[in-house]
Amino acid sequence: MNWVRAVEALREQRRPGVLVTVTTVRGHAPRDAGAKMVVTADAEWDTIGGGNLEATAVARARELLTTGATAPETLAMSLSDKAPSEHGQQCCGGEVTLLLEPLPVVPAVAIFGVGHVGLELARILARHDVELHLVDSRAEHVEPARLRCLSDAVARVHVHHSPVPEVVLGQVPPGTHVLVMTHDHAEDAALCDMALRCTHLGSIGLIGSSAKWRRFEVLLRREGHDAAALARITTPIGLPDIAGKDPATIAVSVAARLVQVFRTEAAPARPAGTTADATTGAAGEVRA
């Protein structure tokens, strides 16, 4: 895998990494300006020239990952037998400047049910840099013609037609925020049950009334979920100050709450790939 495909894969998997680029070269060096590599906590792709140069860059990149740094930094190195070396000597005779750029871990959202509310919500979230998964058991609801309104999306949109939508829960990346809003309450219940059995998800939100949730609580307890597990599901979803039952208003409310969660997740003190409760800052679900 080269560095381009590595960046794409890390984004989709919501894994942190650092892009290392040779920006300037004076004299002789193993690679020309523009050479790139990608570094994660346990892997590297492509090369900027090997030897002490590359080993030093990899070590520094992993320090950035450990500290959760988000700002890019430069690293200048001399390639001579008189230069300090921790990983072996390189005496090419040149000087190299590297740019180390932490790759952002973008939010991921999975909307289960692309009905009236789901589509309105997708239209709003599509304007954000997120990995957006749209899931529906009805093929006609995820046809290209119906989703044409998302053709200019900033988000990466992944469309899933799945007669058994719970399967998709196992396919989304770690930390994905799940929103359950299908056309069928039985389908909603099955999704809630499976979501609670998944340990890699972020928040779990369920659209519906308090009466609906009371019925779901009974069903989910019968399936073996205790009070702590049920607390992972938030219903109703969205900002309580935005009232209204029309699809567009509900979508605005839910999207606004998600944006708050995204900002909390992006705080420098939080490790990449974890989720946060928007109210407390602790790992958990979106609170209404």
Image (cartoon, rainbow, N blue to C red):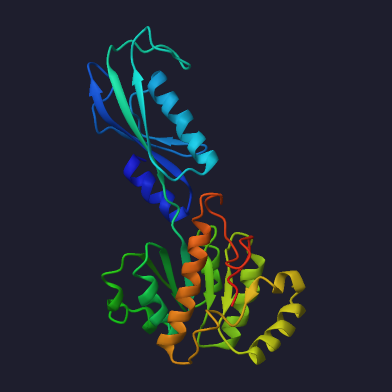
The picture places residue 139, in percent across and down from the top left corner, at 40, 81
Please name the residue shown 33% across and 79% down the image: 143
Relative depth, front residue between 216 and 96? 96
Label total for image = 0
Q: Is residue 169 left or right of residue 149?
A: right
Quarter of the image for the N terminus: give it: top left
The picture places residue 147, in percent across and down from the top left corner, at 32, 78
Q: Is residue 77 left or right of residue 63?
A: left
Picture quadrant of residue 133: bottom left
Relative to residue 119, is residue 90 depicted above or below? Answer: above
Quarter of the image for the C terminus: give it: bottom right
Please name the residue shown 53% across and 70% down the image: 178
In the rendered image, is residue 162 in sight? no
Picture quadrant of residue 95: top left
The picture places residue 124, in percent across and down from the top left corner, at 37, 75
The picture places residue 254, in percent across and down from the top left corner, at 49, 78
Relative to residue 145, is residue 168 depicted above or below? Answer: above
Relative to residue 277, is residue 32 depicted above or below? Answer: above
Relative depth, front residue between 253 and 174? 253
In the rendered image, is residue 94 in sight? yes
